[in-house]
Structure formats: C-alpha cells, structure tokens
Amino acid sequence: MANPRFPTPDWRILVVLYFFSLFLGPNIFAVANNKDAVVITGREDNASVLPQGEDADTGYGTADMSGLCNEDLRTFLPPPYGNISGMVCKPIWNTYILRYLQRDDHVMTIVLSSIYTTGWVGMGFSKDGMMVGSSAMVGWFNKKGHPRIKQYYLQGTRSWQVIPEKGELPLTNVPPVVAIHGAMIHIAYQLKFEHRLGHQPIILAFGSRVPHHLHLTHHDDKRTVMFDFSGGSSSVLYVSSREKRNHGALGMIGWGLIYPVGAIIPRYFKHKDPLWYYLHAIIQLVGFIFGLATVLLGIQLYNKLNFNNANISTHRGIGIFILALSILQILAFFLRPNKDAKIRRFWNWYHHWFGRLALFFGAVNIVLGIQIGYAGNEWKIGYGFLLAIILLAVIGLEALSWMKKRSDKTTTPPTFQMNPVP
C-alpha cells in the first residue's frame, strides 16, 4: 500500500508542478549495459515523492494520466527510445504509464513511466502471474543522484532471494536507460522474444528506500496486471490482502481446527453416550459451514485472478474435493442405518475413511495455500502450532485410551466354567 509518511497532494497541484517542470526543470538520462549507469547530466535536488499505491488518492484519473502520453520522448530519452514512432501508450496503475512497440521481428521496446524522485521502480514479467520466478527491470537514483537500472531475478519472497544482474528477460544490445524528466521517472529497454507477446502477466512494484549495494528493499506496494500486448488492453490480476486473509483464516479454522476436533470426539468419548454423538454432529456441521464458506470465497478469488497457475489450480481442486467429501459425510448422517443392520459395518467403513481423507487433504491444502499465497512466517508458525496441539492431544488421548483398556483387562476377574455333574 502507499507509504503513509508522505501526504498526497491535490491532483491540480501535481499537474501544475509537472507541466511547470517541463519548462524549468532539468532533464537527465543515463545508459547502462550490465554495469553501473553513466550519468550524462545531473540533478541537485533530492525531493521525496513516491509512486502511489493502490489505496492512495493521487487525484489522477485515467483521463488525466492519458494526457501525459502526449509527451515528446525525444526531449529527454536518447535514441532509439526517444524517436520511435507509433508506440502504444496506456495508463495501467495509478501514476504508472506503459509505452511499448512490438515489431514484426518480435523486438519490443518498452518505456515505463511513473511519478518519482526517490526509492526504486520496477516492472517484472511473470510466467504465471506470481512474483516468484519472474524477472524484472528496476530503475532508481542513488543517494548521490547517480542513476541505476538493473535486471533482477525473483527467486523467492525474501530480499536476499531477489538476485541482481540475473534474470530471463531477453535484452537486446541496445543499452537500457533510466531518466528523470520533470516529476516522472522513465525506464526504457528493449527485449527480443521468440514469438509475439499476447496476454502477459506483468508485475509493477515500487519501494521507498534506495537499494543498497544493488540489493532491493522490500516493496511498499505491488500490482499484477494481465496485459494484452497485441491489443493494448489490461485487466488487473489483483486480490486484496483482506480477501486472502479471510480465505486462509476460514480454511484454517474449518479444516485445521473444527474438523479435527469433531473427529476426536467419537474416537475417544464414546463412553459419554449419547453426548458424544450430538457433539460430533454439531461440531462437524459447523466445520462444514466454514469449509463451504472457504471454498466459495476461494472460487471468487480464483475468478478474479483470471490466469492459469498449476499450484493455484491444484489448491482449488483439492478444496472442491474436500467439500465433496464433506457433503457425502452430511448425507451419511441422514442415511445412517440401525446398529443391528447388516450394512452398518460398511457404513462405518465409509464414514470413517471418507472423514480421514477429508482431514488429510484439508491439512495438505492449508500448507499449499500458505505456500502459494506467500502468507509469511506468522501463518506458518500459527498453523504449525495448531497442528502440534492437535497431534499432542491425539497422542495423549490415545495413550489414556490404551492405558484404560489395559487396566480393564487386568481388573476383570476370570470366569470359570463348571464341569457338569454326571
């Protein structure tokens, strides 16, 4: 989300300052070719204006940002970036503007622009819409005002797993450029792909801190967009953190807590008849409600993402499978035969094993959801603690049950069969 330390000015002031800076503000650009960028001209000021995040009220609407597409890039970008005609220009996220041109030989020229004067700004290409495994071009100006632009490979979610000067983006021999013109930063580079790009997930991010020794600080905000490079349209591949937290919390409570507790009741408390039966039925019904809400919210999130990812599809499929098992268990409650019925043995087998399958896949799906959602250590520790408590409870109850059975065997007096008197 947007950095709360920086107040958001009125949009009219930003627009006036921007166009005023076109006439009075100095122009700066730099070129990099896998080494540090070389300063062509410098800038003395070190103001602190950041790209705005998803929740920021920048005052800029789509129409306002579209007006910035009329800039003449030749005034501040070197060839070939400044003199390319026919570039498509699209506002894609708040103050972010994407210009691009895709040639017939699959060479694509990209110019990403955003309001900026400190920190870093990046644009990544993802295979599946996820941050991990993507490659990104990142530009910034260091504390001395020297420009930098590097490719990064996002190997993981930790800052040390964002590797500088690595990545899979097919850069051409044309050196990348980072430039500041007025209130905007411009990151320009060329890529040559094996085929024409159509729908492509791209990741936009920014951080408020200047990278130290090329190591990026954690992003202040990011956005994933499905961009159609063949038509210039885009759709947001974004799910709010609140929606993801709600989905995860419902699943962890329903499948990770309520269902296991409901399964413990009939195994270890059948001597409390008929209390165990009513507790088991009520607890599992509550667990089913939580599980149903989890699946419905998950389907809603899946539809919002609008792209194919193997891990997400697996997570979704397991969730629907668990819901189906839960529905079968609910039906089993209404179809339960009498104790004396011959098919009661088969019903017990069906009820027990379908329940165990639901518990097992529920645990697997919670772990998978934490992994693909990059939920963080607090979720891992929380579920690990919950799972440990349940396992310890089961081990303790199992030990008590075994000790009770053994005690019953030793205290039961032997029975003697009297021989009949002839």
Image (spheres, rainbow, N blue to C red):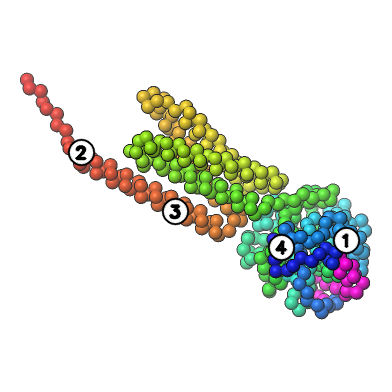
Mark 3 vs mark 1: in front? 1
What residue does disc 4 label? 2
Q: Is residue 39 above or below residue 391?
A: below
The residue type indicated by label 4 comes to Ala
The residue type indicated by label 2 comes to Thr
What residue does disc 1 label? 68
What residue does disc 2 label? 412
First-in-chain label (3 vs 1): 1
Q: Residue drawn 66% across and 46% down?
A: 301
Q: Residue furthest top?
A: 422
Checking the image for residue 148, the label placed there is none
First-in-chain label (2 vs 4): 4
Q: CA distance from mark 3 to mark 4?
A: 37 Å
User: Image quadrant for the C terminus?
Assistant: top left
Q: CA distance from mark 2 to mark 4?
A: 72 Å
The residue type indicated by label 1 comes to Leu
The residue type indicated by label 3 comes to Ala
- Element marked by disc 1: helix
Q: How many marks?
A: 4
First-in-chain label (2 vs 3): 3
- Could you classify mark 4 by the number of other residues whose Cα lies within 10 Å: few (under 14), some (14-19), or many (20 or more)? many
Q: Is residue 376 left or right of residue 94?
A: left
- Could you classify mark 1 by the number of other residues whose Cα lies within 10 Å: few (under 14), some (14-19), or many (20 or more)? some
Q: Nearer the viewer, residue 104 or 418?
A: 418
Q: Are marks 1 and 2 in contact (CB under 8 Å)?
A: no
Q: CA distance from mark 1 to mark 4?
A: 22 Å
Q: CA distance from mark 3 to mark 1?
A: 56 Å
Q: Residue drawn 69% across and 61% down?
A: 1
Residue 342, how many percent across, how many down?
Answer: 39, 23
Checking the image for residue 388, the label placed there is 3
Per the rendered image, the range of residues in magenta is 15-39
Mark 2 vs mark 4: in front? 4
